[in-house]
Image: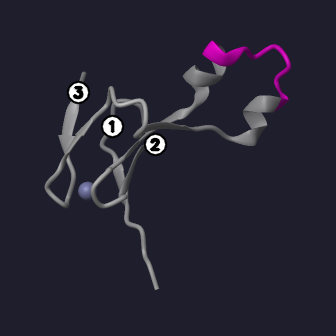
Amino acid sequence: MAKMRCTCGSLIRDDDPDFSLILLPYREFDDAEADSAMLLGRGVDVRRCQVCGRLWVFWDEGGDAVEYVQVRD
Ligand SMILES: [Zn+2]
């Protein structure tokens, strides 16, 4: 289990099933041979801060997460 600190100050854990997300291109679904485990491996890991709603996307495996901030009008 890994933890990271959000910009808002809250702690984000990677083992929270409600806030750990997988970003998966539709392209991956075109592969009829792909099962769910295979699809998981092709997805991009995302964490969502449950306090502020920021998304942290790990575009590069093992790299730093890119921060996306929700904008409300
Ligand atoms: Zn936050």
Left or right side of 4 for 15:
right
The quadrant in which residue 18 appears is top left
> Magenta segment, principal secondary structure?
loop
CA separation in Å, label 3 and label 2: 17 Å
Q: Quadrant of the N terminus?
A: top left
Q: Mark 2 touching mark 1, by CB under 8 A? A: yes
Identified at 30% across, 61% down, the residue is 52
For residue 2, the mark is: 3
Q: Which residue is mark 1?
A: 63
Residue 27, how many percent across, how many down? 77, 37
Circle 1: residue type: Gly
Disc on the earlier residue, 3 or 2: 3
Q: Is residue 37 above or below residue 62?
A: above
For label 2, the residue is 59
Q: Nearer the viewer, mark 3 or mark 2?
A: 3
User: What range of the chain is rendered magenta?
Assistant: 30-37
Q: Secondary structure at mark 3?
A: loop
**Is 67 covered by the magenta stretch?**
no
